[in-house]
Amino acid sequence: MGKYSRLSYSLLLATLLAACGDDSVSEAKLISDGDSKLSSEKAESSSSVKSQNKSSSSGKVDGSSSSTDSADVDIEGLDVIYVLVDGTVSGSVALESFDKSAQVKMVLLDSSENFKRTGSSYAGDIAKDGSYEIKKIDLQQPYVLFTAEGKFENVVDGKAESTQLWTLADASSGELFNLNLLTSLESERTLNLLVNAKMLYDEAKQRAVQDVWNVFHVDADGFDEVERIKVFEAGETATALLGASVLLQAGADGDFQKFFKSLVGDIAKNGVWDDSVTRLAVADWALGTDLEDGYASIRKTLGKKMDKVPGFEMYLRNFYLAELGFPACDEDAVGKVFFVRNKGSVYYAARYDDLSHSKERFVCNEKFSWASIPDSLKDFMGEVPLAKDGDVRQGAFSGDFFVYDGTSKTWRKATAIEKDKYFVLNSKATEFVDIQDVYEGIKDDERVIFVLRHAERGDDTSKSGTLTSNGKKQSEDVGKRLTKFKEDFVLGGSEFLRAHQTVESIAKGRGQQSDVRDTIPQLNDDWYVKDADAVEKAKNECGGGWEVTSKYAYTGAYSTGADAAYYDLAERSVELIEDVLLKKYPTEKFVLLSSHDKLMVPLVAYCSNFNIELKKYESNGKWINYLAGVAIIIDKSGNRRYVAVRGLTSGFAN
């Protein structure tokens, strides 16, 4: 581009004039920005410029033959004449395809009229590789706007995007002017500062450059001017430009022109990307893509466009680290755990163990960079509560259960018994709850298995013994209260007739048409019995079947040693729950089963952590009532809680 002499606050550029006896200018020589000294002759000549009237001149500059008009602009009382040197500019447009008639247009701006576009413009054809050249330029002022239109392939989604790029330039500052996404952002911001803040051009340009790089959280100290570089060149500035361009393409969300136009206007106003929603979405994209190793795919795409892809990834990471509030990862922070606290982010977590939005957690590693914590380690990081030997804890991330070993001060994986103990303790069952309340409180993502003692029976205690007429009425009355949900109950009972009559009558009471009933031998009253002969012996010692059953349930009596009458309470209860009931009914929403008192007493004792006392072996000890039992409630994760339920007014027998 032809260079011009100019006068600014920091440096005087003067035209060396040779007086020929009149006020006309016969010859001019450019004094470049690099000259630090003026000869006394030049100083005298520059002082003579003050008296020059507006005129035109022509002549040879640096041996070239060029005829041009020149205009002197009054800056603080000095008339400065802009003189064209060679009249050519060139550059590259950071787009990949153009129409056959595509051109770069250069429009002269009138600095005295708020940098409005004038009628003077020039154009040059754009080659297939995006390069252009504009020749035979004759400018009266140095400020120009370059514009070009074309398409590019979005490296994020592979779609072809159309857009316009532009560059605001001081034509006296060089001959190379590239157009890219950042020059467009910078140009609009510069114009706003020139027009509204009334800054000098150099000051406005410097401020705009800083504002634009700040949008991407880039320290641009020492960077080249963006319009001097190509996005696919080597060098730090080009790498940062490439990173910023990828982020901008990620923010488009299917309509780049609309997105980019909005962003340009946003930054032009105050130098800040005020659209926090889109900004956060881009940060989430950058983080998510990094977590999925998606930068490799972008690098592969870029590799088709350039010989060697620079390390653009660091600029994407810097962006999401800053936007999502990651703290510094330095020597003092090694081992520190972080999770995103910005509520608008898809990676937000209110607490370390809050999984309602995201399971992603991060740790500052020994390389002083933030790394995603593997799922296998997440359960043991963050703020782990103090534990004592034998404490059971569910890992918030894996869902697995662990037991604390106080000796080694480590967590090990829990056994089935230890895991169920966790459920028992967290159920906090301390009293019988009305079965209707429990039934109606079942959530959409929960299911329930009710296991109840049968209703009132007759004197026949054999397998063929039946309910009394009152027992059938008791059951029907319970069924009438279990009608909130449309789903039918899946019905089942032990091998005893009265158990089947109980669930049949409940179904009849609620108006249920289906009467298909499962027979489950494990619900017979001898489930906890290990040795029947040993049980008979224990009955004689303890005073009866109710007494020995309850003493076993609450004290562990008769369940140890080679001649044990009963199985271990916890092991046998978990076996019934997990290996029998949950395996038989893995998905059913509502299940209603009937069993017997000698099974229900140990099961209630276990599921309530012995808080509900059915200690018939004690003086005035209580026994379980008809239609009382346990509700096993399972959530969507497979975790469960236990509730002691009653179908009658009391869970205790008279």
Image (cartoon, grey):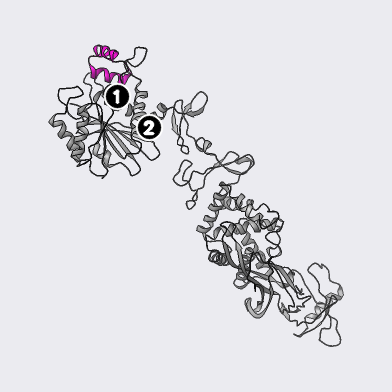
Residue 260's image quarter?
A: bottom right
* Amino acid identity at mark 2: Phe
Give the x, y percent position of residue 336.
57, 40
Depicted 168 relative to depicted 355: above or below: below
* Amino acid identity at mark 1: Pro
Q: Quadrant of the C terminus?
A: top left
Left or right, 358 with reference to 473: right
Q: In the depicted view, which residue is nearer to us: 124 or 601? A: 124
Q: Crowdedness of circle 2 by 10 Å Cα count: few (<14), some, many (20+)?
A: some
Left or right, 55 with reference to 469: right
Q: Are marks 2 and 1 in contact (CB under 8 Å)?
A: no
Give the x, y percent position of residue 173.
74, 69
Depicted 559 relative to depicted 438: above or below: above
- State which region is magenta: 530-556
Q: What residue is shown with label 2?
A: 423
Tell me the number on the disc at residue 602: 1
Circle 1 sits in a helix, a strand or a loop, which is it? helix
Give the x, y percent position of residue 475.
18, 34
Residue 628's image quarter?
A: top left
